[in-house]
Amino acid sequence: MSIFAMDWYLIALLMFIGFYCMLASRSIVRQLIGLEIVSKAAMLTVISAGALTANLVMAQALLITMIVIEVVVVAAGLALLVKAFRVNGNADIWKLDGLKG
């Protein structure tokens, strides 16, 4: 089995772990951790595809954009976590009804 195939198996494993983390938990913190794992798997996919096609400059430009978007999403998620914890006293995703307006 080639190294390239092993890369894709690792990426698929990371994707499934991230999606399971996001689907199986009700905590906002665990949701954000699952989102980070999925995001890192997507970044590894871009790196692996860039190495396969020998187009690393394009992969690096795309990765920088992905990192900036990821930082904004995580910052918004953490702000939601802080607000939910102040209103409800916990980080349960099902109790976000009180965060209106």
Image: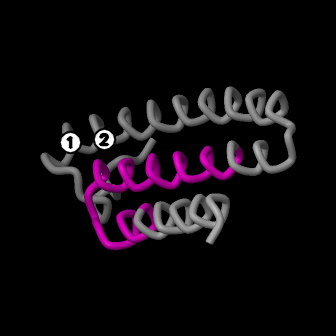
Residue 85's tag is: 1
- Asked whether 36 falls inside the magenta stretch, the response is yes
At 28% from the left edge and 64% from the top edge, which residue is drawn?
A: 26
Q: Which residues are magenta?
A: 18-46
The residue identified by callout 2 is: 81
Q: Give the answer, above or below, for where 29 lies relative to 63.
A: below
Image quadrant in which you'd find residue 60: top right
| 72 with respect to 62 (left or right) | left
Give coordinates of residue 75: x percent, y percent: 44, 30
Give the total of numbered labels.
2
Q: Quadrant of the N terminus?
A: bottom right
Give coordinates of residue 38: x percent, y percent: 51, 55
At 66% from the left edge and 36% from the top edge, which residue is drawn?
A: 66
Q: Residues within 10 Å of mark 2 (few under 14, many from 20)?
A: many
| 62 with respect to 36 (left or right) | right
Measured in 3D between alpha carbons, the distance from the residue under mark 1 to the one under mark 2, in whole angstroms, is 6 Å
